[in-house]
Image (spheres, rainbow, N blue to C red):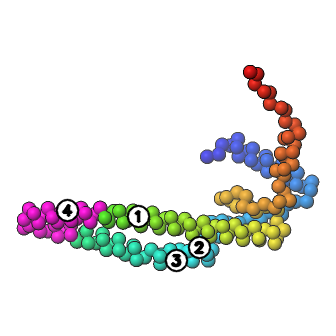
Amino acid sequence: MLSIKSILRYYLFLLVLLGASALHAAPAVGFVDVVKVTRDAPQMKEVEKALEEEFVLREQKIIEMRDQIAALQEKLDKEKRSMSTDERRRLERDIKSRELRYNYNKDEFLQDKQLRTNEERNRVFRVIDEVIAQVGKSKSLEIILSAKAGVLWRSERIDITDDVMQQLQSIAKPIAQPQK
């Protein structure tokens, strides 16, 4: 949570920035609703559909495993009294064994699906970043902002990093060498 002091400093900084830019030509600023772009991008919808198709068979197998375990458990619950001790123990071991395989396969499935989802989403995010930069350049913008992500893109014309570094180097004092 931002403190009131932090918010006031931020707004003071913006006012100074706006005041300084008023002396020069106002920079062209763009805004992108990243949440909307991410949610509605056709590339993201393609990824979601492709991943669903990629994992549907594995998901069905896991559901079948779960249903088989449930059916065996139901059989055990119903017929427990009429089964011999050996039959009951065999069925209990079978259920435990199937539960272990089910849990392993389910965990592996979820991890694989999450990994693939992250890979594909990151690929789409790189495309979105490239498109944002292309649009910024084509519209001669200086900076593109987002409410969630801050600065998405900036023109090299407004990058003063090298100037700041030169100034810092010019005022830097030599660091005293430790005496031996």
Mark 1 or mark 3, which is nearer the start of the sequence? 3
Mark 1 or mark 2, which is nearer the start of the sequence? 2
The residue type indicated by label 2 comes to Met
Q: Are marks 2 and 1 in contact (CB under 8 Å)?
A: no
Task: Tell me what residue is drawn at x 30 percent, y 69 percent.
Answer: 66
**The C terminus lies in quadrant:** top right
Identify the residue at the far front of this view: 180
Mark 2 or mark 4, which is nearer the start of the sequence? 2
Task: Tell me what residue is drawn at x 22 percent, y 65 percent.
Answer: 95
The one nearer the camera, 174 or 51, is 174
Helix, strand or loop for the magenta stretch, by majority: helix
Mark 3 or mark 2, which is nearer the start of the sequence? 2
The residue type indicated by label 1 comes to Glu
Asked if residue 81 lies in the magenta stretch, the reply is: yes
- Give residue 93's mark: 4
- Give residue 44's mark: 2
Give the Cα separation between the discs numbered 4 and 2.
44 Å
Estimate how packed mark 4 is, as few (under 14), some (14 to 19) or many (20 or more) residues with alpha carbons within 10 Å.
few
Helix, strand or loop at mark 3: helix
Helix, strand or loop at mark 2: helix
Using the rendered image of the protein, determine whether residue 161 is visible from the camera's viewpoint: yes
Q: Can you identify the residue that label 1 sits on?
A: 108
Across and down, in percent, residue 161 comes to 82, 50
The residue type indicated by label 4 comes to Arg
Task: Tell me what residue is drawn at x 50 percent, y 74 percent.
Answer: 51
Across and down, in percent, residue 112 comes to 46, 66
Mark 4 or mark 3, which is nearer the start of the sequence? 3
The residue type indicated by label 3 comes to Ala
Q: Which residues are magenta?
A: 72-100
Q: Is residue 147 left or right of residue 115?
A: right
